[in-house]
Amino acid sequence: MRLRHALALLLALPPILLAASNTLTLKPGGVPLAIPVPTGFVLLSQSDPRFLATRQFMPANIALEAMLVDPKDAADPKANFKRYHMVQTMPELNGMTIPPVQFKSMVDDFERQMPALGSAAEQTVNQQMSNQVQKLNQQRTAKVEKLKLGETRMSKLERQTDRFTFQMWSRLQFKAGQKTMDATVYGVSSMINKRNKVVQLLSYSLNGPADEAWTRTTNTQWATTTLKQP
């Protein structure tokens, strides 16, 4: 997959550590990057079935490094996440040094392609979900009858020399036995370049339009704070 298409989905996992200061540390290409955990959220265990299921639905070129959720949701294995954050990288970039001029070029390309990228992401993710649902249904008693990502729209919010923030809307439909969901997923994603490494910080809400301001503010502050830390 070409780089600009891979960037549209930034959605080998480098080691992850959680310091006492509530800071997540990634090591893409062996370079330590401190990622603060947003206030009111905790790191979801990578052995949690919900983390594992989410990772299964990621495109092969995307690495889900961490999910950050409400402490109550983390403690309740049956809870559905209404607000959550994700940290992602692209393995093909982890071993590369991305200086500011190259990051600018990547963002330029991404921004030019953005009008068409929503549809491309929708098609790719739905194919990925369809493949995984087939595998899951072979292992489960309660069959997943429907899992579909609807029309995806993307638009630019803010751009800095080391950060590009954009917003996304998608309709998510799910049905498995008596459990159903039909919700609009609103997300804000910041692609950052820290210590010449590219990381994607994503914030999501399923609480509808009333939560859009919270999602934008939280993600922007999270990305800004991350870039300020050593």
Image (tube, rainbow, N blue to C red):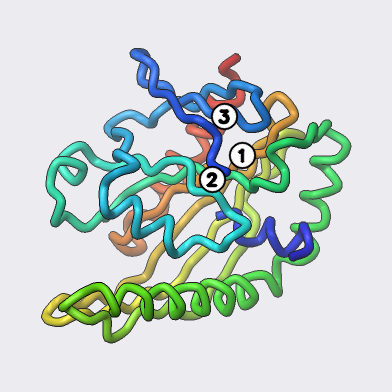
Give the mark nearest the N terminus, 2 or 3: 2
Say above or below: 65 vs 196: below
Foreground residue, 47 or 146? 47
The residue under the point 56% across, 63% down is 59
Q: Position of residue 63 (x, y in %)?
A: 54, 49
Distance from disc 1 to disc 3, alpha carbons, whole Å, reads 13 Å
Q: Position of residue 181 (x, y in %)?
A: 24, 75
Picture quadrant of residue 103? top right
Foreground residue, 182 or 5? 5
What residue type is disc 1 on?
Val
Q: Which residue is mark 3?
A: 224
Q: Which residue is mark 2?
A: 88
Query: Dot 2 surroundings within 10 Å: few (below 14), some, or many (20 or more)?
Result: many
Distance from disc 2 to disc 3, alpha carbons, whole Å, reads 17 Å
Q: Which residue is mark 1?
A: 199
Circle 3 SS class: helix
Picture quarter with the C terminus: top right
Give the mark nearest the N terminus, 1 or 2: 2
Contact? badges 1 and 2 (CB < 8 Å): yes
